[in-house]
Image (cartoon, rainbow, N blue to C red):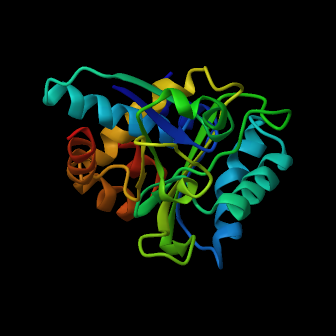
């Protein structure tokens, strides 16, 4: 499982998303590779990831193929919401 | 890099500010960093442009925004400002798209020390009562007690 967190510049919100995802993965004993990047970088590497998180504003800028999942987040500090979305996506 | 030290160094905390709209709020929040020399005036324009293009993608959670633009010539140093407003400032049309706490940051490149500070910001606001305490702070000294 490869997870990518995306934001406008790859510095601010994507790091927050990455931090929160890591916490949830650790808590649930899930092993996955996890990276963050900017929107520009994401467009060229997105096909290498299974699960992509971004703030809701950036979701429309991204496109995923096949069974890969793209999830938009509204409140980046809401761990419960993120955990639900993450665990559901991981099946 | 510590958020607190950087805010003191840049003299970049302002409390209880007033702004008519989001552009003015961002201008107020970027100003301390222009004064300290961390960014040029162009940095404000960059943030406005990217907000107009993508929307307020830097909302951390309703009430808290971290406006920033990409590292370029407008950025001279890694720096943060923390500015609170008397009233919530509308950043977009959707529910939750407002902020009363603005944390502007500038990074000289995407791999720098700024990454160390983001977890510090998350830690502060993971304690929910800190949000009200920070908004309620009426002086820089008082606000520094909470970060």
| Residue drawn at x 57%, y 73% as measured from the top left | B92
Query: Can residue B2 be seen from the camera position used here?
Result: no
Nearer to us in this view, B132 or A59? A59
Q: Write down the quadrant of residue B69 in the picture.
A: top right
Q: Quadrant of the C terminus of chain B?
A: top left
| Residue drawn at x 40%, y 42% as measured from the top left | A67
Percent of width and height locating residue B97: 48, 69
Question: Would you place residue A68 above or below residue B48 in this image?
Answer: above
| Residue drawn at x 74%, y 34% as measured from the top left | B38
Question: Would you place residue B133 above or below residue A36 in this image?
Answer: below
Percent of width and height locating residue B4: 46, 33
Query: Can residue B84 be seen from the camera position used here?
Result: yes
Nearer to us in this view, B82 or A87? A87
Percent of width and height locating residue B31: 72, 52
Nearer to us in this view, B30 or A5? A5
> Is A29 left or right of B83, judged from the image as shown?
left
Percent of width and height locating residue B42: 85, 48
Question: Would you place residue B39 above or below residue B134 in this image?
Answer: above
């Amino acid at each position: 499982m490869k997870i990518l967190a995306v934001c406008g510049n790859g510095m601010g919100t994507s790091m927050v998303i990455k931090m929160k995802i890591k916490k949830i993965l650790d808590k649930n004993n899930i092993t996955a590779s996890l990276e963050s990047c900017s929107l520009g970088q994401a467009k060229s590497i997105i096909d290498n990831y299974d699960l992509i998180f971004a703030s809701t504003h950036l979701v429309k800028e991204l496109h995923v193929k096949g069974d890969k999942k793209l999830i938009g987040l509204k409140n980046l500090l809401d761990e419960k919401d993120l955990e639900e979305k993450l665990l559901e996506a991981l099946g | 890099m510590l958020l607190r030290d950087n805010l003191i160094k840049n003299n970049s905390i302002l409390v209880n500010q007033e702004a008519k709209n989001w552009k003015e709020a961002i201008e107020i929040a970027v100003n301390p960093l222009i004064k300290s020399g961390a960014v040029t005036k162009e940095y404000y324009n960059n943030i406005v442009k990217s907000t107009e293009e993508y929307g307020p993608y830097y909302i951390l959670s309703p009430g808290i925004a971290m406006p920033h633009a990409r590292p370029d010539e407008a950025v001279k140093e890694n720096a943060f400002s923390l500015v609170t407003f008397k009233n919530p400032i509308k950043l977009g049309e959707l529910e939750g798209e407002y902020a009363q706490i603005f944390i502007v940051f500038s990074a000289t490149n995407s791999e720098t020390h700024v990454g160390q500070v983001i977890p510090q910001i998350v830690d502060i606001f993971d304690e929910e009562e800190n949000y009200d305490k920070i908004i309620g702070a009426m002086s820089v000294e008082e606000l520094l007690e909470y970060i």
